[in-house]
Image: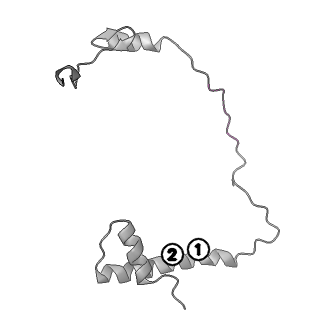
Amino acid sequence: MASRIDQDQVQHVASLAKLSLNDDQLKYFTTQLDEIIGLFETLNEVDTEGIEPTSSVSDQINVMRDDVADNWGQSEGLLANAPESEKGYIRVPTIIDESEDE
């Protein structure tokens, strides 16, 4: 059985992911990735002649509603619970005071 992935490729991917692998880890992950690729290659053996492509395996259909903004008085309720509000907004303490930068 020919190897589908080698240690240089695994090392390259590890470096792209900023991972440092020792020799034992490099051998382990090379074997693991080779087996994973092999599992995907078995899909090539499936006879799909006459099978139509599909994007969904379920016959359920999403029921969508129109995206309409409703104002049910939520802002008034929110502002009523805020410690301070001003002009329809929640007033919060100043975090950065830029007036002293000059």
Tell me: 24 left or right of 74: left
Quarter of the picture holding the N terminus: bottom right
Please state the extent of the stretch shown in magenta in the rendering: 61-67
Percent coordinates x, y for residue 3 in the rendering: 51, 87
What residue is at 37 percent from the left and 14 percent from the top? 89
Magenta segment main secondary structure? loop
Query: Is there a contact, CB below 8 Å, between mark 2 and mark 1?
Result: yes
The amino acid sitting under disc 2 is: Ile
Quarter of the picture holding the C terminus: top left
The amino acid sitting under disc 1 is: Phe
Tell me the distance, in whole angstroms, between the alpha carbons under discs 2 and 1: 7 Å
What residue is at 44 percent from the left and 78 percent from the top? 9
Color style of the picture: one colour
Secondary element under disc 1, as helix, strand or loop, is helix
Percent coordinates x, y for residue 82 in the rendering: 31, 14
What residue is at 37 percent from the left and 65 percent from the top? 17
Residue 62 falls within the magenta-colored stretch = yes
Residue 95 falls within the magenta-colored stretch = no
| Mark drawn on residue 36 | 2
Dot 1, how many residues are within 10 Å of its Cα: few (below 14), some (14-19), or many (20+)? few
Q: Quadrant of residue 61?
A: top right
Secondary element under disc 2, as helix, strand or loop, is helix
| Mark drawn on residue 40 | 1
- Front residue of 52 and 95: 95
What residue is at 30 percent from the left and 83 percent from the top? 23
